[in-house]
Image (spheres, rainbow, N blue to C red):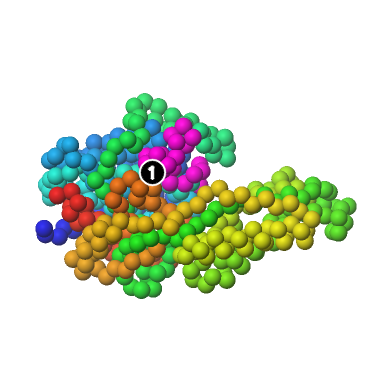
Amino acid sequence: MTLQHVNGERLWGSLMEMARIGETPGGGSRRLALTAEDGRARDLFCGWAREAGCAVTVDRIGNIFARRKGSDAHAPPVVFGSHLDTVPTGGKFDGPLGVLAGLEVMRRLQEQDIRTRAPLELVNWTNEEGSRFSPMTMGSSVFVGDVALDFALSRQDPAGITVSDALAKLYPHTELAPVGGRKFAAYLEIHVEQGPLLKEGGEAIGIVAGSYKALYFVATVRGEAAHVGPTLMEQRRDAMAGAAALTLEVERIGRARGRDGRSNAPHVEVFPNVRGVIPAEVRLSCDVRHADPTESRAMADELRDACGRIARERGLEIALEQYFEFGPIECDAAMASLVRDQASALGLACRDLLTVASHDAVPMMRHCPSALFFIPSETGISHNEAEYSTPEQCRHGADVLLNAVLQLAR
Ligand SMILES: [Zn+2]
């Protein structure tokens, strides 16, 4: 089969136009899941998908599917996509690249008048980031049955608005389709790397061969509320100071592992969180990650020890509760080699790597043969307004997606 190429300029134009929805002063995007901004992004996407000849449906968790008919209507679809929601200080590429590269595939096939045997579906998954509603990868996890629909719909944002309320506001008149319960022939997702490895190595494509093992915790630090003035330093049982000590321990545990370890304490809730009162309770969310699952567990043990030590030293109580884990995932070797072959045929250098973060492709791996692949992060970072990949890097990724889709659906 001859190689096909996307229109890189059109892809770039769509990425930039999408990024203007929820544009931030620092050049990024803020589109929290199921907000008005996300709604505008969804509308723009649906309009584009219809122009590209696709039929659009939205399911009961808000996942959007844009379907292009195949010559065999009974064949399960080849599916590809990602997410349009962002973190509060998000960039232009984490998520939108996967959706809009997929849109470019649909546009290209339409203008080239290429008919595939299997139907194609481009998906925008709901709430991948988990910034507004927990858990993350919500839409894809409900789709595959890892998370119950009713549980997901009942999740609340910090203002007490549920997923169900937010969906009703975005789709007051849309008949929403059932979630999941159908087969995919395959799933493909292209994403920005979110780290520096491809940039350092000079490869155009990174094929995800597996993942880190990540363990997520909430540490609840309990001390005693007291007046910030009269209370002697020796009298205090300051939950905030304990949480600060624990934060530094979390960092130390990751740093001790060099480049293979990661550790974070990115979210904190303080009670009562007023200026005149020594904090009585702090809830600190933290996680540890490593390429080697044994090391991840050792990191978690160190974290537990640190909680015990800090609690004793400071007269506090610290309860550590694990609430989520991710990985290690096993990627489909045949799908990975299909992507690798397309990259090679296009003359693009590629390498295998592990993903440190979860993506919608991760729940999909248990649903159907799936592949996840990365293009370089030019700035080496994401979840940041400065996230950047070049037009050429985006085009190369979309070219690989287009040809992989054609191989799977022909
Ligand atoms: Zn993402």
- Tell me the quadrant of the picture where the N terminus can be found: bottom left
Label 1 neighbourhood size at 10 Å, few (<14), some (14-19), many (20+)? Answer: many
Q: Which residue occupies 55% across, 53% down? A: 216
Q: Tell me the residue that label 1 is attached to.
A: 140
Q: Residue furthest front?
A: 294
Q: Nearer the viewer, residue 177 or 408?
A: 408
When the figure is inspected, residue 216 is found, relative to residue 32, above or below; the finding is below
- Asked if the stretch drawn in magenta spans residue 134, the answer is yes
Say how many tags the image has. 1
Name the one closer to the observer, 128 or 255: 255
Quarter of the image holding residue 352? bottom left
Provide residue 376's location: percent of width, then percent of height. Answer: 36, 65
Residue at position x 51%, y 63% from top? Answer: 294
Membership of 78 in magenta stretch: no
Q: Can residue 31 be spotted in the picture?
A: no
Taking the spot 52% from the left edge, 72% from the top edge, the residue there is: 258
Q: Is residue 189 visible?
A: yes
Q: Is residue 273 left or right of residue 156?
A: right
Residue shown at 48%/69% (left/top)? Answer: 260
Image coords of residue 375 (percent x, y): 33, 62
Amino acid under label 1? Ser
Q: Pinpoint residue 241: horizontal percent, then vertical percent.
A: 73, 58
* Badge 1 residue CB within 8 Å of ligand 1: no
Mark 1: which secondary structure? Answer: helix
Q: Is residue 274 left or right of residue 178?
A: right
Location of residue 402 with respect to 59 vertically, above or below: below
Q: In the figure, residue 2 lies in which quadrant?
A: bottom left
The stretch of residues the image draws in magenta is: 131-152
